[in-house]
Image (tube, coloured by chain):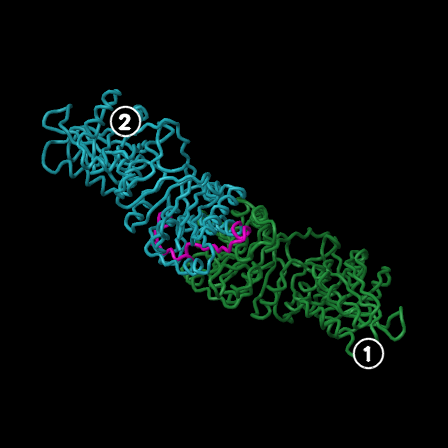
Chain colours: A cyan, B green
Amino acid sequence: MALLVMKFGGSSVTDAEAMRRVAQRVVTARRGGSQVAVVVSAMGDTTDDLLDLAGQISPGTLPQRELDMLLSAGERISMALLAMAIQQLGVPAKSFTGAQAGMRTDTAHGRARLLDVQPERVRRTLDDGAVAIVAGFQGISTDDDITTLGRGGSDTTAVALAAALGADVCEIYTDVDGLYTADPRIVPSARRVTRITIEETLEMAAHGAKILHLRAVEYARRFTVPLHVRSSFSDQEGTWILVGRPLTEDTMEDPLISGIAHDRTLAKVTAVGIPDRPGAAAAVIEAVAGAGVSIDMIVQNVSTSQADTSDLSFTLPEDDGPTAVAAVRRLQESMGFADVLYSSHVGKLSLIGAGMRSNPSVAARLFSALADAGVNIEMISTSEIRISVICDQTNLDQAVRAVHTAFELDAEEEAVVYGGTGR
Amino acid sequence: MALLVMKFGGSSVTDAEAMRRVAQRVVTARRGGSQVAVVVSAMGDTTDDLLDLAGQISPGTLPQRELDMLLSAGERISMALLAMAIQQLGVPAKSFTGAQAGMRTDTAHGRARLLDVQPERVRRTLDDGAVAIVAGFQGISTDDDITTLGRGGSDTTAVALAAALGADVCEIYTDVDGLYTADPRIVPSARRVTRITIEETLEMAAHGAKILHLRAVEYARRFTVPLHVRSSFSDQEGTWILVGRPLTEDTMEDPLISGIAHDRTLAKVTAVGIPDRPGAAAAVIEAVAGAGVSIDMIVQNVSTSQADTSDLSFTLPEDDGPTAVAAVRRLQESMGFADVLYSSHVGKLSLIGAGMRSNPSVAARLFSALADAGVNIEMISTSEIRISVICDQTNLDQAVRAVHTAFELDAEEEAVVYGGTGR
């Protein structure tokens, strides 16, 4: 008998009617002969409502342990209601908290990492023929405190549960019907991708595509969990994410390029006029890393401002901007460089595709498409299956559209528009 | 150092402002030098809102296991917010679920009974100088499922926690400032009782007074937990409930009678014309008890309708009325009695006071007061510290007022009016 993990985000369970629709889908899968474990997020606005209450009580920084306790109530409500809705349709169902489902985490409240998954009660429930419903986003720490897994946490719960149960597939239900070759809000002619490798999905998630959380994709790759991203509002197949591209005739015809991700959440720091001596650039990067900032891309080149000096630029998450600038400024006098520049007005475009490995013309085609569109490339970084460029944020949408067209990704019909939730 | 358990019901934590007021009270107690454990119910309307959602999803009977999972979210929200509010005032605080606080119950969802209380984490938290906040109303079953304790459950949690911790006192905060000699909505001149024995409180709770739940009072008596019922809106002392009346000069002057409880939730069943043979009455009562109905009072007397027969009347909770009538009707033909009568229009007045033990004139004074007020007594039952009478429900308020005056319980000023919550 097939074992299916179905994950429903908050936008799939906004109210009683949506809950009944999800229940009907679960029941159909169960009656179709599969064992079904469901992972569910908090209903629609629950998290925001709880945060609002907390903000009224504690205007400053919220204490993380208690915030996790508070927010974990959200899944408790949605999973109990979903169990009721499924039972109402005549199929037995039981809900389980993160702790009951054996989701053991470290003690990092608000961004806990899973250490161990022991879903014995879930397995027993499935073996009894019932549907097991597991709270997404939450676990219990090694100190027996309630923890939450941070953004994208419910996806991670679903993938981890699928891995621990040895599920045949982990279905991620969302409000769009799969992964697209680009964000349809920017490229209306973006096409739904029917199959994609998990490595490409990882690059997409890491470089700005928001539909699946990076951590969940990493987990899926590590434990070889096949994912199927699809819409909770239709029965049509979505995007299958597979570990290693299956060399069937069908996929042989898949395009070279899987898609284009973009990211508007980055900033750029430049140290201007660093003296041209060994180790100078490394000292700057070390100082920034030492402040806990994760650096995205780095470029060093000869300074235009002063002889025998160079400029060092790096990109980083915008939220870490002030920390990074402060860290660099602390070095400015001792190292004797001219200035520190900061811009949050940068955009990143990433072209992703397994086909890139064996096809050197991809980079040339990308740069030429950007040049034709009048987009200036500020920085470049590459992996085996990705090329990313940094440009001015003003040009980002235009750049995405130009590259999408240049790689012949445009569909004939317009796509539905992305949404998405945080858990 | 004194150890204090403070229990706050849902009406004490209706919103952020009320939550801050409760936090201030807890912090004042902690700074005053006591160790403080807090038991808190779900905020104001949370339970009703969750039940409403569940009703939209599952219009029939709600599955109890999932209902407990759902409702337990309510305390999770209130206790996390209260911990934040206390921390905001500079005092460390940690919240604990029923499971984390060691509240082990049987598996009777919706009305679980505590089997064992092992509050090790609460104790460690108190020893660390922090305030421990425990979810009222909920526990974890021997099957590791979330359970709720039913109506009055948070009071039971508080008393059980106080017993397990060996607390010096369990303070029950509510929206009135103590126990009254009668319900002030009926007797505006009712007086607040400053001290009362736990046995009298038990009789009050068992016979219709709603301020403390019977189960919590039973628990307090069994484990000798001193209770202090007081208002969350004022600093004034409320009612102290003590195990064994302390024979101080102060209490020597306490009135003979502690108060008058009343109950409008009963019904009366009468089997008319039961043949006058041994065991006939017992057979009727056994049939009713066998149907799971708990009988309150029983009266048998010679029937006025037919010679050599008697009428048997008993009172019972109104909700069990149809079940009881059906059980009696099943015997009617085989036993050959004339009719089964049912009335939900009965009222019960109970006069409670430890002084009654040694004072036979109390009953005479009660009956004479009722006669003077024109109230007809239908049934009577007594214990060592209580006399209860059944009358027509129409006369109940009048009866309560007349008896209150006859026993000189009237205060000079009018009381505040009762409220109260379900958990």
Residue nearer the viewer, B330 or B95: B330
Q: CA distance from mark 2 to mark 1?
A: 100 Å
Find residue B81 and report its horizontal and vertical position in percent. 48, 48
Which quadrant would the C terminus of chain B be assigned to in this image? Answer: bottom right
What is the number of the mark on residue B277?
A: 1
Residue under the image location 54 percent in, 42 percent down: A17
Circles 2 and 1 in contact, beta carbons < 8 Å: no
Residue most extreme to the bottom = B278
Find residue B322 and report its horizontal and vertical position in percent. 73, 60
Find residue B171 and report its horizontal and vertical position in percent. 56, 59
Label 1: state its secondary structure: loop
Residue under the image location 80 percent in, 62 percent down: B391
Asked if the stretch drawn in magenta spans residue A104, the answer is yes
Q: Nearer the viewer, mark 2 or mark 1?
A: 2
Q: Residues within 10 Å of mark 1 (few under 14, many from 20)?
A: few
**Residue bearing mark 2:** A403
Q: Are marks 2 and 1 on the same chain?
A: no
- Amino acid type, mark 1: Arg
Q: The disc numbered 1 marks a residue on which chain?
A: B
Residue nearer the viewer, A403 or B218: A403
Q: Residues within 10 Å of mark 2 (few under 14, many from 20)?
A: many
- Amino acid type, mark 2: Val
Residue A144 visible in rendering: yes
Find residue B287 and report its horizontal and vertical position in percent. 72, 70
On screen, residue A79 versus residue B388, left or right, reads left
Magenta residue span:
A85-111
Quarter of the view holding residue B195: bottom right
